[in-house]
Image (cartoon, rainbow, N blue to C red):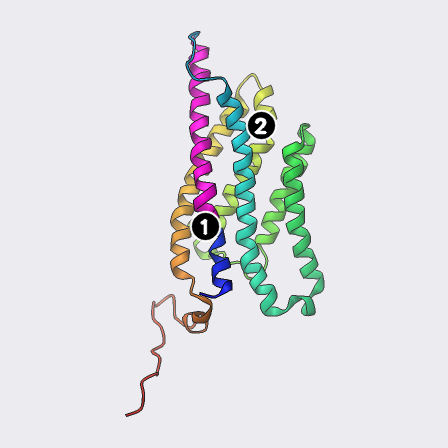
Amino acid sequence: MELVDFLGLVHPAIAVTIVFPCIGIVSYFAWQTRERRLQSADGGKSKIPPIVGGEHKRIGEWLCIAVVGLCLLGLAYPIGKNIIKKQLWNQNLFQLTFIVLMFILAIVCLALLLRARERLWRGIFATLTGTALVILGCQDGVFRRTNEWYWSHYYIGITASLLMIFSVAIVQDIYQDRSHRWRLIHTILNCVALLLFLGQGFTGSRDLLEIPLNWQESYIYQCNYAQKTCLTPNNQAPK
């Protein structure tokens, strides 16, 4: 395994060791927060400590950081390979600069989103972060599987990342809304996000099986994926 192949494993490794455990923790605190709220609404005294709500919010923010960071990392690998392959610094310096600025914009705007309190600024920073992710996803080198968008690791990942960004953006509205409309929206969208994360586990495993090692690419990419056939190598020694 060459260095480029090892770098390709960083994205799934972080997903397994950091993101998915964090999803479980956030889901647990979300359920505990809901149970405590319902028990308190009935007039009873809940045995669930009041700290669960704050922990759910805090770890939820860390989950958003992890998901967006993982998305950026997953995009950086194929984009970086394409940049090196085409020597973009010689061919199109403007495009290279633009790509780098989009990565910086996504990181900076996410950091500002986590600190923003006013609705206007939360909306602006959330929109800029999501826009940067979408623009980066449109760059050359990113495998999108557009013909099967409903089962694409890329499209599911981008959608889950956008839902995480939106969830963070509406946190202040949840606390200020007495009609619980934003809380309901938050719950529904994050249930959808949970299903998307489960889908990511399947599609990510599938894609790892389909991606060849660097030294195998020249042969594997000659295969006919529609007919599921490959060229027969003529490597037999002469008699």
Q: Is residue 223 left or right of residue 90?
A: left
213 in relation to 168, above or below: below
Q: Quadrant of the C terminus?
A: bottom left
Q: Position of residue 79 (x, y in %)?
A: 57, 59
Q: Residue flagged by tag 1: what amino acid is it?
A: Ala
Q: Which of the marked residues, 1 or 2, is nearer the chain's N terminus?
A: 1
Which residues are the magenta region?
13-42
- Residue marked by disc 1: 13
- Tell me the chief SS of the magenta region: helix
User: Which image quarter: residue 177?
Assistant: top right
Question: Which quadrant of the view contains residue 118?
Answer: top right
Q: Which residue sits furthest top?
A: 43
The N terminus: image quadrant: bottom left
Instruction: Look at mark 2 in the image and give the residue it sits on.
Output: 171
Outermost residue on the left side: it is 239
Element carrying mark 2: helix
Compared across the picture, whether 177 is left or right of 19 comes to right
Q: Residue at x 58, y 21 (%)?
A: 175
Cα gap from disc 1 to disc 2, whole angstroms:
29 Å
Comparing 145 with 34, the one in front is 34
